[in-house]
Amino acid sequence: MGTGIEYGAFEAGRHVNYWELDRTLQRELRRVTDTETFEWAEPRLAEFGELIGHTVADNADYVDDHGPELETYDEYGDVQNFVRYPAEQLANEAAVYEAGIVADAFEAPPGRDEPMPFSHYLATLQLLCYADAGFGCPVAMTAGSALVLERFDDGELESYYRGLVSRDYDGLIEGAMFLTEEQGGSDVGANETTARYDEAADCWRLTGEKWFCSNVDAEGTLALARTEDAPAGTDGLSMFLVPHGDPDDGVMTKGDRRAFEGAPPGDALNDQLYRRLKDKLGTIAVPTGEVEFEDTKAYLVGEQEAGFKQMTEMLNLERLSNAAASCGIMGRALLESRVQAANREAFGKPIDEFPLMREDLVDMTVDYEAATAYVHEVGRLFSERERARRADESSDELEDTYRLLRLLIPIAKLRTGRMAVDTASYAMEIQGGNGYVNDFVTNRLLRDAQVLPIWEGTENVLSLDVVRALEREDAHEPFMRAVEDRLEAVDHPALADAAETVETAYEELLGALAELAEADGEYAQLSAKRLSHYVFEVFTAALLLAEAQSDLEDGNGRTAMVARRFVTTELEERDGRGITGGDRFVLEAFEPIVHHAPVDAETVSETVTADD
């Protein structure tokens, strides 16, 4: 079963290999990936973890202090829309994209006959966000744009698709999604940007403003606009690709921009104005701005008035990417906390020997385990659906997968975004005063984490999406089967009490679902957020118990400890808020849970009996 990790041997959570230290991510990716694919990917993930832990992490700290700058006009007052990036950021881009972070999920990497599952993409994105969640944003939108073009383009935009999935940095373009307008926000149907067809130029032209445009100078930007005589609301929106460069000159790749040795001349640009960059709290690596379209050249993607439906496909991947980024921030915050607690001494001993700190580190670890397990289970389902779509397969089982994803994806983003903020905040506290100072990475982790509950839909918006999935898709049906199948597989004595608690919570959740199905719309909305968190907790508890059952059968009891603690903290009703029960579980489980020290199944059974 290996040995535990000695965090006292590290000075900080950098200049290390993030893949090798993240045994949770290793376990989850091994679980959701077939053996041959995992064995092929593992050495590459180790190389990627080394790259992120050294070069990218160092560069990310510099970029946070010297981020991109916008030079809207040149010295003559002409529009140039030039975003100046520090060399360190360009170096990170080249290294990460050429490692295949996007390309591998769309085109077979060298040595393979088919693309990697999206689970692999999510794992690499999670590792990237150990170092820079800001850079994770353009990576995620590049993958999202590629997914949309792969699915809906008729071939006219093949050159843009090839740029989005390029492994050669000079041939690469990045993606973006200009969705938000000042008067619309989450109410996408209120968007006012218009599109008219220019027969002479054989292109569409967009006019309007976009308010929160991350990766503002992307060449593969997707935007929604309303064509003439289109109906109001989301039904009347069409999707367009809006290049940074003049599309008459072809695709402007990273290599083309480098060849200009500065800002491209005005006649090489598309007709739009980058008004300003937002002065953001965090995610400095990604330039977020305001954009004015004025007869801006654009290409229609797919069918007219199908834009919102097409955008939801991108949003699904973006929300799942957001959740993976949340896991990345949690993983880095946890690593920094473990190292600090193992090295900092107070009253003559390391602070991780004190009971309160042990409880904190155990619960931070369990949160990370829960978030990572949930996200990669949803990633497995997403990968399965995309593989079947590419193979043009259909079945009742795949339809159930889609319905389950409609429920689980918004919850993935909703819950993990909040968990990332909480974990980063407490990691800052563990560092003490240093954690509050910009010289230390926890400062940036918290600033970056704070946007994760906002990007791609706030918690309230996502909760309402969950209610719609239940009402319109009957998503509770595949959800019930997924939970029941896992609980039925759990029969190990070490898990008996936890399984009983989850079964009770599951029955109560079903009762809540039945009551909301009969409730008026206002009450259903009022309950939506609590329901979403309840679904996460029950589903994740069942998932962790099933994983623990499998590991116990192999003689490994650590996951059982994790599952039991998650059930205790999230689903048990404890007398006196747990104070009166004499529970010392976290003290006994500290080394296995926090340091990944091996623990056999018999030890777990004895611990459970003693506690009870």
Image: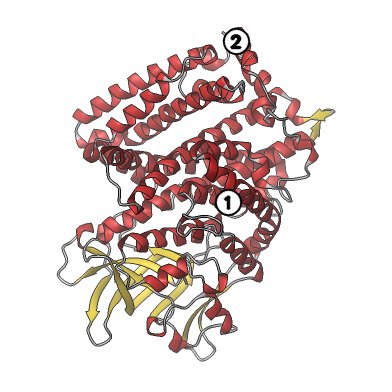
Give coordinates of residue 16: x percent, y percent: 72, 48
The image quadrant where one finds the C terminus is top right
Residue 457 visible in the picture = no
Where on the picture, by quarter, is residue 93? bottom right
420 vs 457, left or right, is right
Give the distance between the C-alpha atoms of the residues marked 1 and 2, in whole angstroms. 38 Å
| Crowd around label 1: few <14 · some 14–19 · many ≥20 (10 Å) | many
Local secondary structure at mark 2: helix
533 vs 239, left or right, is right
Give coordinates of residue 137: x percent, y percent: 50, 58
The image quadrant where one finds the N terminus is top right
Closest to the observer: 570 or 171?
Answer: 171
Picture mark count: 2
> Do callouts 1 and 2 mark residues in contact (Cβ within 8 Å)?
no
299 vs 411, left or right, is left
Question: Closer to the N terminus: mark 1 or mark 2?
Answer: 1
13 vs 45, left or right, is right
Going by the numbered disc 1, the residue's amino acid type is Cys
Q: Is residue 3 above or below residue 611?
A: below
Residue 479 visible in the picture = yes
Q: Which residue is mark 2?
A: 611
Going by the numbered disc 2, the residue's amino acid type is Asp
Q: Residue at x 56, y 57 (%)?
A: 111
Q: Is residue 146 above or below residue 412?
A: below
Q: Residue at x 61, y 49 (%)?
A: 45
Closest to the observer: 488 or 53?
Answer: 488
Give coordinates of residue 504: x percent, y percent: 38, 16
Where on the picture, by quarter, is residue 463? top left
Give coordinates of residue 69: x percent, y percent: 57, 72
Local secondary structure at mark 1: helix
Q: Which residue is mark 1?
A: 129
